[in-house]
Image (tube, helix red, strand yellow):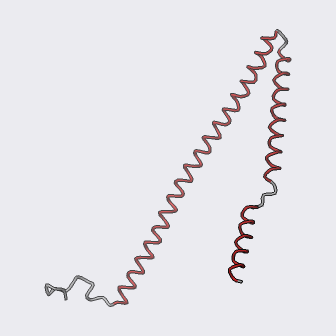
Amino acid sequence: MSENGMTPPESAEKSLGEIVGEVSQKASLLVREEIELAKAEVTTKAARIGKGVAAFGGAAFIGLLGLIFLFHFLALGIADWTGLKDWVGYGIVTVGLFMLAGLAALIGVRLVKRGSPPTPDMAIEEAKKTRESLEEVRH
C-alpha cells in the first residue's frame, strides 16, 4: 500500500524473484538490441568506407592516365623545343623516369634499413628499467 491507501499497479503483486527475473530478461534484451544496433552501424560505415576506397581507386587510375599523357606531352614538347625527332624526346623522358625510379628505390632501401628489424627497442628498455626498479623495491 502507498501513502494514499492504493496499491501501486502490478508491482505490489509481484514477488522479488519475478521482479529480478523480469529485470534480467529486459537487460539481456537491451544488450541484444545494442549489439544489433552496433552491427548495423558498423555495416553502414564499412559500406561507406568501401565506396570511398573505390572512389580513391578510380581517382588514382584517372591520375595515372593523366600522368601518362603528361609524359607524352613532355616528350613531344622536348622534341619540338630542341628540334629533334620525337623518339629522342621520348628517350629523354624515359631516362628521366628511370632516374627518378632509382632515386625512389635508394630512398626506400635507406628507410627500410633504418626501420629494420622491427623490434620495439624503447619498450624493451622501459620494461628492463621497470623490472630493475621493482627488484630494487623488493630488496
Which of 97 and 23 lies nearest the eye of the viewer? 97
| Residue 19 sits in quarter | bottom left
Say which quadrant the N terminus sits in: bottom left
Q: Which residue, as the protein is rendered here, is positioned at the far left?
A: 4
Q: Position of residue 84 (x, y in %)?
A: 84, 11
Judge by depth and name the residue closer to the eye, 126 or 87: 126
Vertical placement of 111 versus 85: above or below? below
**Which residue occupies the extreme top position in the image?**
83
Residue name at image x 14 percent, y 87 percent: 5
Query: Relative to 25, does residue 126 appear above or below in the rendering?
Result: above
Q: Identify the image quadrant of residue 20.
A: bottom left
The answer to which of 62 and 103 lies nearer the viewer is: 103
Q: How many marks?
A: 0
Residue placed at 85% from the left, 22% from the top?
Answer: 91
Query: From the viewer's perspective, is residue 99 above or below residue 28?
Result: above
| Position of residue 103 measured from the top left corner of the image (x, y, whole percent) | 82, 35
Residue under the point 73% across and 61% down: 122
Q: On the picture, is 105 further left or further right than 32? A: right
Quarter of the image for the C terminus: give it. Answer: bottom right
Left or right side of 51 for 91: right
> In the rendered image of this protein, does residue 121 appear above or below residue 96?
below
Residue 79 picture quarter: top right
Residue 117 position in % (x across, y down): 81, 57
x, y percent for residue 138: 69, 83
